Amino acid sequence: MEWHIREELAPILFDDDDRLAEEALRDSAVAPARRSQKAERKAGTKRTEEGFPVHSFQSLLKDLGTITRNKVMVAGESFEQVTSPTQLQQRAFDLLQIPLR
């Protein structure tokens, strides 16, 4: 399951999200994988093409873990409220095609 999630989140992770370019750089199917220019640029700048900071899978999970659902009580009435995601957190949910609300 993690593999599938990482594939979807690759644009904001250090993972190579340009598989075609990566495969084109290989001399043979058994040759070691080489990073695409896109992945090298992402690793060098520590930024995505959209300007977000690049994350490892674990650091992104920690970042997403700051989103909370709170039960709020006002004048005897209660409701649940989800914290507003950052732009990066929203991008992660968009890539996973998961509505936050």
Image: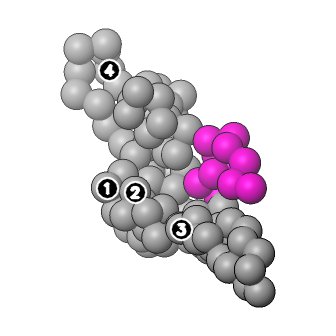
Identified at 35% across, 25% down, the residue is: 26
Q: Mark on residue 27? A: 4
Mark 3 or mark 1, earlier in chain? 1
Q: Do the residues labelled 2 and 1 touch (CB within 8 Å)?
A: yes
Q: Mark on residue 4? A: none
- Spatial distance from mark 4 to mark 2, Cα to Cα? 35 Å
In percent of width and height, residue 31 lies at 23, 21
Secondary structure type for disc 3: loop
**Could you tell me if residue 40 is visible in this image?**
no
Q: Which of marks 4 and 1 is in front?
A: 1
Q: Which amino acid does label 1 sit on?
A: Gln
Identified at 37% across, 64% down, the residue is: 62
Q: Which of marks 3 and 2 is in front?
A: 3
Q: Nearer the viewer, residue 45 or 64?
A: 64
Identified at 55% across, 38% down, the residue is: 8
Q: Are marks 4 and 2 in contact (CB under 8 Å)?
A: no
Q: Which amino acid does label 2 sit on?
A: Leu
Q: Are marks 3 and 2 in contact (CB under 8 Å)?
A: no
Residue range highlighted in magenta = 91-101
Q: Mark on residue 68? A: 3
Residue located beneath label 1 in the image: 58
Mark 4 or mark 2, earlier in chain? 4
Mark 4 or mark 3, earlier in chain? 4
